[in-house]
Image: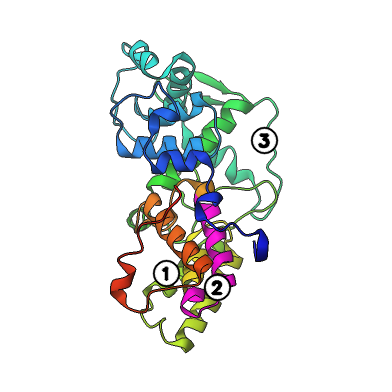
Amino acid sequence: MAGHDAPQSSAELLPPIVHTFIRQEYSKTDPALPEMLEAHLLEVYKILKIWGTDDSLARCGLMHSAYSNSFVNLAIFKPDVERSRVAQLIGQEAEALTYRFCVVPRQQLIQVDLLDKLPMGSPDLTVPAGGLTVPHIRTGEPLHVDLLELGQFLVLTMADFAEQLFSWQDCMFGNTDGALRLEGAPDPEPRYLCCILTEQDQQAARDLYWEVVSDMQQQHPQHAQQAAEKLQRVITLNPWVPEPHLMLAQLHIHAKEWGAAREAAGTALKLFAQWGTAWDKRMPWDAWVAWTRVCYEAAVEQHWPQQPLGVLSMGMVQGL
């Protein structure tokens, strides 16, 4: 990204689908969307669209707990009499996927049958070619889940968990080892085809990141250097989340290291665009995107306000 190849505008780093969601032009993503959407459901839909899933899976994200599921008993629709109504809202294919998602035992399917059998640190993500058979959560009848459906359920669970998990849930479920069992619930951490993020590295990165966030003395050059070194360690442990890159960009900006600031902010912006949700839940995703764009534009222009009041005027970023 460094040098002449780096975009001059942060807007160039964001794909069109991200522009659409930031503008809240939801009808452009899918004209058939219901008008009233609960916040979490819309956020899951947004993540799935940004991840490039098809409309059926994304619309399933809008209704993923419509009939209750193995995690929550919050039925909005009665599956025995209202499935046709849901189909009218999101289409037959999406409704069928939604119903299946609501009746499989996800914690058994994903955690026990898949992830618990994957040696930590191994890149071998092979699953049975014929899929898996699990019991219906209400009737106990056997349900066969083929490879496509299994992949859809994995992606949807990742989006669901990534959007709504906060630190208080770690405390409630005793998630001290980073495994995120939720008393037998699936591990939602993204598992990449070439690399595995271990629970230990994930937790170490989280704790070190929060140590930097909690340190209010970063403005002193010595403390800023220590913070930058810690953030580099965070990025080494977990390079797939954007917020550490953004914090590093801010430190580079204060040091007037404009090239390094632009590179770090650009990396953060691309990661926010890929995730469609925030890792650090202190702010919503679109607020993180906005602040990252501010930092990127400041690095490009090689200017940062000298007085705190000047920061208040930085929210107007052109080009989106």
Q: CA distance from mark 1 to mark 2?
A: 25 Å
Q: Residues within 10 Å of mark 2 (few under 14, many from 20)?
A: many
Where residue 219 sits, quadrant-wise, is: bottom left
Pointer 1: what residue? 210
Q: Is residue 78 positioned above or below 308 on the image?
A: above
The local secondary structure at tag 1 comes to: helix
Q: Which of label 1 and label 2 is nearer to you?
A: 2
| Spot occupied by residue 47 in the image (x, y as percentages of width and height) | 47, 40
Report the span colored magenta.
251-272
Display coloring: rainbow
Q: Residue at x 50, y 68 (%)?
A: 301
Q: Residue at x 41, y 46 (%)?
A: 163
Q: Is residue 308 magenta?
A: no
Q: Say whether residue 283 is left or right of residue 117.
A: left
Q: Is residue 104 positioned above or below 117 on the image?
A: above
| Quadrant where the N terminus is found in the figure | bottom right
Q: Nearer the viewer, residue 299 or 72?
A: 299
| Spot occupied by residue 314 in the image (x, y as percentages of width and height) | 36, 63
The local secondary structure at tag 3 comes to: loop
Q: Is residue 144 positioned above or below 40 on the image?
A: above
**Residue type for callout 3:** Val
Q: Residue at x 46, y 71 (%)?
A: 250
**Residue type for callout 2:** Trp
Q: Residues within 10 Å of mark 1 (few under 14, many from 20)?
A: some
| Spot occupied by residue 86 in the image (x, y as percentages of width and height) | 36, 17
Q: Say whether residue 264 is left or right of residue 81.
A: right
Q: CA distance from mark 2 to mark 3?
A: 46 Å
Q: Which of label 2 and label 3 is nearer to you?
A: 2
Pointer 3: what residue? 127
Q: Which mark is residue 126?
A: none
Pointer 2: what residue? 258
